[in-house]
Amino acid sequence: MTTSMPPLSITSPSNPLIKRLRGLDRKRNRTETGLFLAEGTRLVLQGLNNGWQADTLVCASSMLERPLVQDLVSRAMADQTKTIQVPDRVMGQITRKDNPGAVVAAFRQQHRTLADLATTNSGIWLALYEIRDPGNLGTILRTADCTGLAGVILLETCCDPYSIEAVRASMGSVFDIAFATSDFPAFNAWRKDQGLTMTAASVNGTIRHDEASYSGKALIIMGNEQAGLPPDIEATCDTLALIPMRGGADSLNLAQATAIMSYEAWRQQGYAGARGATG
């Protein structure tokens, strides 16, 4: 499918729409507008295919003749999404990159509560307590997607999953994996009601991470990058697991530690739903 009508051309970075899109790199503006940016044809297509609503589609004028870009433009215009073309220099200002992609879209955020999360008889859930690094969060969402986790719960004050850094690091998994926000008391009541056993990765662990049981309905909880989990949170866990380490380093990056825990849990469930992996 190709478009017979080119999108509206905007060339000035001072245009109000361009300024609005540029401002989405700040959380205050994302909160006020309810929008966030996703860059690249693959990510934009992934968002649309997963039913996320695009508010605005922007394409680089130099890339407009590419078939996939034309298809995205036609789809956006058919959905009555605001669709514009801009010079590469303006695209770079929107994405704040020297070499921006061919398209960028502003999507409407989705805000889920615990009640919105679908529960099943089995599966692994992940909770993240007050993580602050958006790169870590995006990478963890990607790992959760790869390991087929049931969903991710962001506890207390976490960084914004809709920040540009988190969306980029997720490589599109922000559109695939269900995530919700909650305070800890409501979350702990919810997970008990769901019959979820809770295992924390902790320096206070009493068994190795691969000796913990993740059968049935289970949940992994990971703490803040610097402080880990507070003692009162650890006290609510069923198991404290320790990831073995050697050498001078005394800790792993949070995203790496979460990947280790998630893959071990998935391994114990027989890599259910696995397909061929690529590097």
Image (tube, rainbow, N blue to C red):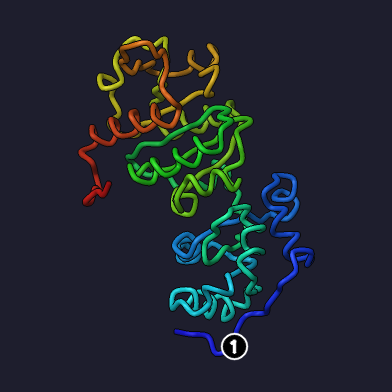
Q: What residue do we see at 70% from left, 56% from top?
A: 22
Residue 137 visible to an observer of this rendering: yes
Nearest the eye: 262 or 165: 165
Q: What residue do we see at 38% from left, 41% from top?
A: 143
Residue 196 visible to an observer of this rendering: no
The quarter of the picture where residue 198 lies is: top left
- Image coordinates of residue 104 in percent, x first then y, are 57, 63
Residue bearing mark 1? 5
Element type at marker 1? Answer: loop
The quarter of the picture where residue 20 lies is: bottom right
Q: What residue do we see at 51% from left, 33% from top?
A: 190
Q: What residue do we see at 48% from left, 13% from top?
A: 235
Task: Tell me the crowding category of disc 1: few under 14, some 14 to 19, or many 20 or more residues within 10 angstroms, Cα based.
Answer: few
Q: Name the side, left or right, on which 265 lies relative to 93.
A: left
Can you say which quadrant of the picture contains the N terminus?
bottom left
- Image coordinates of residue 109 in percent, x first then y, are 61, 54
For badge 1, the amino acid type reads Met
Residue furthest bottom in the image: 4
Nearest the eye: 66 or 210: 66
- Image coordinates of residue 213 in percent, x first then y, are 28, 24
- Image coordinates of residue 142 in percent, x first then y, are 42, 44
Count of marks placed on residues? 1
